Image: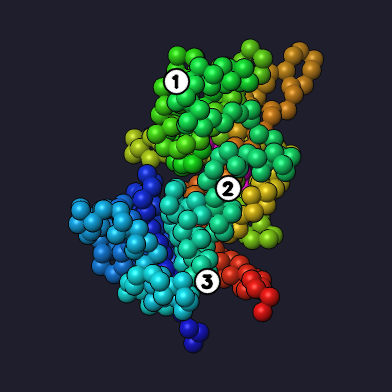
């Protein structure tokens, strides 16, 4: 009988998406094939403390999101324990320098961490240092996938269509808000979307229709990051640009060097855009439509764009690629309507992973059920780690 792989599922974290991570991890732990994998739950409390065993299970159950560190211990102790979940699990010098938890030797880590301090390359860098296989993109891909400004630079370099945007630094905004407003209004038309460059789940995002709304929106985004991205809204064309509502479309991508794309899905939000409440409020009436109602040519175009975006950001394992599509333009009598423009919005390198999240649902509709998807991601992690082993890091 083949030896079971020991898989560490890491969840929680210090980001504002802590609770979302717990939901994703709970779904994975329920669905993963226990005949193939020996599963080790590893939690990260909101204060940064790493937890295993009963404490990790308690975190998952919602009994504690702060961990057991005394209040006065502060973040210094929490940071000192960062990475402790893989201590004694890895036979490397990097692992020896980490605090130990009762995890045993891990063959692969599945970091189900959404947002900062988990999805942004920080945990990935630690796992690279410890020389352990892990699910998802590497340090570069994870960092780029989190930073909406850097991401757009990659998209533009690959010739992918993106919306007009302006990036401001928090220091620029605080030093000269009038100049910043002038720069935005010189380059963009209202409505615009104001976003923190590094955050997920639509936290800190505002739709701005007038100058009076711009400063409060930038102040809100600046709470969450030093870089603020301001994007021109996608709507209709001509007179309908300000009132047309963009379609929000998503594609799941799976693979390493030869990725594949799922069918296209569409989110029909219950408000002006798919914000945090639309995603996670139990009273939300936002609806996913899978597959999206598109022409065969539009679907093909978007799936090709999704793979190009995946490669442009040097991603691996998984990503959800999000698009914005203009509201369908109306044709003049005797003339066919012009095709609606499609823009690449962003990539998400660790999307929501509950059994009813869009990423698994898109693959379910494409013929890959949830449990098989988990299995494929683990195998992709091992494949990528084996490929990395072919790289020499010294002359000797």
Q: On the picture, is 77 further left or further right than 274?
A: left
Secondary structure found at label 2 = helix
Among all residues in the image, which is located at the extreme bottom? 1
**Does 64 appear above or below 109?**
above
Q: Nearer the viewer, residue 247 or 153?
A: 153
Q: Nearer the viewer, residue 160 or 328?
A: 160
**Residue drawn at x 46%, y 67% as measured from the top left:** 109
- Earlier in the chain: of badge 3 and badge 2, it is 3
Q: Nearer the viewer, residue 85 or 160?
A: 85
Secondary structure found at label 1 = helix
Magenta region, residue range? 263-267
Q: Nearer the viewer, residue 147 or 396?
A: 396
* Mark 3 in CB contact with mark 1 (< 8 angstroms): no
* Mark 3 in CB contact with mark 2 (< 8 angstroms): no
* Residue marked by disc 3: 131
Residues at marks 3 and 1, CA–CA distance in whole angstroms: 45 Å
- Earlier in the chain: of badge 1 and badge 2, it is 2
Q: Measured from the top left, where is residue 174 in percent x and y?
A: 45, 26
* Residue marked by disc 1: 215
* Residue marked by disc 2: 144
Q: Measured from the top left, where is residue 291 in percent x and y?
A: 59, 43
Where, by quadrant of the figure, is residue 230 drawn? top right
């Amino acid at each position: 009988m083949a030896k079971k792989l020991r898989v560490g599922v890491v969840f929680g974290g210090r980001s504002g998406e802590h609770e979302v991570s717990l939901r994703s991890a709970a779904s994975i732990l329920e669905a993963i094939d226990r005949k193939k994998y020996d599963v080790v739950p590893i939690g990260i409390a909101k204060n940064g403390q790493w937890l295993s065993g009963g404490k990790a299970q308690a975190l998952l159950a919602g009994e504690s999101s702060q961990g057991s560190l005394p209040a006065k211990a502060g973040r210094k102790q929490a940071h000192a324990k960062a990475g402790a979940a893989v201590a004694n699990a890895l036979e490397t010098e990097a692992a020896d320098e980490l605090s130990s938890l009762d995890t045993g030797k891990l063959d692969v880590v599945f970091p189900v961490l959404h947002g900062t301090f988990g999805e942004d390359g920080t945990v990935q860098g630690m796992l690279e240092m410890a020389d352990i296989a892990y699910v998802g993109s590497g340090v570069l891909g994870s960092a780029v996938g989190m930073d909406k400004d850097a991401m757009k630079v990659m998209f533009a370099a690959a010739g992918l269509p993106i919306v007009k945007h302006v990036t401001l630094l928090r220091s620029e905004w605080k030093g000269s808000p009038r100049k910043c407003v002038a720069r935005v209004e010189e380059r963009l038309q209202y409505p615009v979307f104001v976003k923190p460059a590094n955050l997920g789940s639509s936290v800190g995002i505002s739709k701005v229709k007038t100058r009076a709304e711009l400063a409060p929106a930038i102040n809100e985004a600046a709470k969450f990051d030093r870089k603020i991205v301001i994007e021109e809204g996608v709507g209709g064309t001509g007179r309908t640009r300000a009132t047309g509502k963009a379609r929000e479309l998503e594609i799941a991508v799976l693979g390493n060097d030869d990725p594949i794309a799922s069918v296209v899905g569409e989110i029909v939000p219950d408000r002006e855009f798919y914000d945090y409440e639309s995603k996670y409020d139990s009273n939300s009436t936002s609806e996913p439509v899978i597959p999206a109602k598109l022409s065969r040519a539009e679907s093909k175009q978007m799936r090709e764009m999704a793979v190009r975006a995946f490669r442009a950001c040097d991603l691996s394992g998984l990503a959800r690629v999000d698009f914005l599509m203009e509201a369908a333009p109306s044709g003049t009598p005797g003339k066919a309507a012009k095709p609606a423009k499609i823009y690449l919005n962003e990539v998400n390198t660790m999307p929501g992973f509950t059994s009813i999240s869009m990423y698994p649902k898109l693959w379910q509709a494409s013929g890959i059920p949830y449990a098989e998807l988990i299995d494929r991601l683990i195998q992709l992690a091992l494949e990528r780690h084996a490929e990395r082993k072919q790289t020499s890091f010294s002359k000797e």
